[in-house]
Image (cartoon, rainbow, N blue to C red):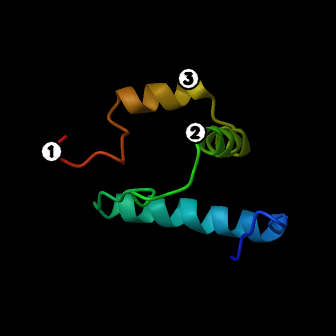
Amino acid sequence: MSYSTESEPDIDEVRRLMERAVRGYGQLVESGQAVPVLDADHRVTATDAARAASALLHAVNLEVFELALWETWGGRPWQTAGE
C-alpha cells in the first residue's frame, strides 16, 4: 500500500490490510513465535495506536475491561517467554 501524507488511503484497502495483519499476527502467536508488532523505527503515534486498538475492540465487540481481564490470565502475546 502506498501511503502519502498528501492523499488519503483507500478505505477498503486499509480494511483488507488490517484484517490480514491482525489474522497473520494471531497465527504467528499461536505458533509460538514472539513477534514484534512494529519495527524499531516505526512512525506510529500513540494516537494512531489508540485509534486502531479502539476500532479493533469495537469491531469484535470486546470491551477494554475484557481485554484487561484476558491479559491478567496470561494473554500477552508481545512478551517473550523470558519476560
Q: Quadrant of the C terminus?
A: top left
Label for residue 82?
A: 1
**Figure check: 14 above or below 68:** below
* Image-quadrant location for residue 64: top right
Look at label 2 and name its amino acid. Answer: Ala
Q: Residue lying furthest bottom in this view?
A: 2
Secondary structure found at label 3: helix
Residue contact at pointers 2 and 1, CB within 8 angstroms: no
Task: Report the label total.
Answer: 3
Relative to the observer, which residue lies in front, 41 or 10?
41
Drawn side of residue 12 relative to residue 70, left or right: right
* Image-quadrant location for residue 13: bottom right
Observer-side mark, 3 or 2, equals 2
- Distance of label 1 from label 3 (alpha carbons): 26 Å
Q: Residues within 10 Å of mark 1 (few under 14, many from 20)?
A: few
Q: Residue lying furthest left in this view?
A: 82
Residue contact at pointers 3 and 2, CB within 8 angstroms: no
Label for residue 46?
A: 2
Look at label 3 and name its amino acid. Answer: Phe
Look at label 1 and name its amino acid. Answer: Gly
Label for residue 65?
A: 3
Q: Quadrant of the N terminus?
A: bottom right
* Picture coordinates of residue 43, whole percent (x, y): 55, 55
Of mark 3 and mark 2, the one earlier in the sequence is 2
- Distance of label 3 from label 2 (alpha carbons): 20 Å
Observer-side mark, 2 or 1, equals 2
Residue contact at pointers 1 and 3, CB within 8 angstroms: no
